[in-house]
Amino acid sequence: MTVQQMKDEILRLKAENDICILVHAYQNHDIFEVADYIGDSYGLSEKAAAAKQKTVLMCGVRFMAETVKILSPEKTVLLSHEDAGCPMAEQLSVQELRELKAKYPDYAVAAYVNTTAALKCECDVCVTSSSAVKIIKNIENKNILFIPDCNLGSWVAECAPDKNIKLINGGCPTHMRITPADVEKAKAAHPGALVLVHPECKSEVTKLADFAGSTTEIMDFAKKSDCSEFIIGTENSIIEHLQYMCPDKFFYALSKNCVCENMKLTTLVDVYNAVSGKKRCEVVLDDETIRLAKKSLDEMHRLGSM
């Protein structure tokens, strides 16, 4: 079977089997072409909740599929590859968080959406990279325990200086590979290019950027900008996608090492196996986990709409 034949078969099977395919922006472009929706993790879970299909396939990592299940408990939720996890989402255990909450009882706990469902159950509110600043500013409590990404947390702390934010030692291993030296080298090679980075990068890197934002915000910035050259400081698959979206512009990797091994586990064959039923990884959560985890997501919506 050729790549195109497989894509055609996936499109046929997903319609036949009533499956909605969600594709995170860090997947490869072949998988993009069979998607119903493409985007950031939380935005995809909202699309799934509104979709008419009864089965949802998340082409991403496990915490993303869990979030889909939390928002759509009545639907069957599949993960494209059973081993696709997120090191950052798993850096803090439930017991460790409970100990931190006991140590800082007067702190509100804000969790980056890149956390497990079990951790979300223990938190007051979730945030996304695009909503974090607004939500943290709107939290009534001045004292905030921010988990697990200290890089996103430090970026938020700079944007919300009136809050007392305590950070936990965690972060995205992929984005943490990018260094200030990478920025200097890329700028020297492409002096006319704008540097666009994800706030999961180290603060020393983010401070050197022309723009910092979520994956979707980075892509939107590049598409709308009058500039013709960009240095991209997030997972390197974004460069390929932008090259297709903006063939008249040029995109360069801030670091060739910014590759998420977990995202790269999913292949087009995995998608085919999932929609055909040959190999399925269903994500299941109990009712109590769904109920408790959803509270932190509902609070995110409340604070985000203020």
Image (cartoon, helix red, strand yellow):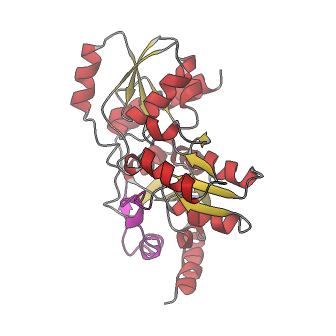
Query: Which span is picked out in magenta?
Result: 256-283
In the drawing, does residue 97 fall left or right of residue 136? left
Task: Verify whether residue 276 appears in magenta.
Answer: yes
Q: Quadrant of residue 286?
A: top left
Q: Quadrant of residue 150?
A: top left
Residue at (47, 11) in percent of width and height:
141
Report x, y in % for residue 300. Answer: 54, 28
Q: Is residue 75 visible?
A: no
Q: Quadrant of residue 228?
A: bottom right
Residue at (54, 47) in percent of width and height:
45
Numbered marks: total: 0
Report x, y in % for residue 39. Answer: 58, 53
Residue at (67, 54) in percent of width and height:
192
In the drawing, does residue 81 fall left or right of residue 134? left
Task: Verify whether residue 130 appears in magenta.
Answer: no
Q: Is residue 161 visible?
A: yes
Quadrant showing the C terminus: top right
In the image, 221 versus 299, the foreground residue is 221
Q: Is residue 7 above or below residue 293?
A: below
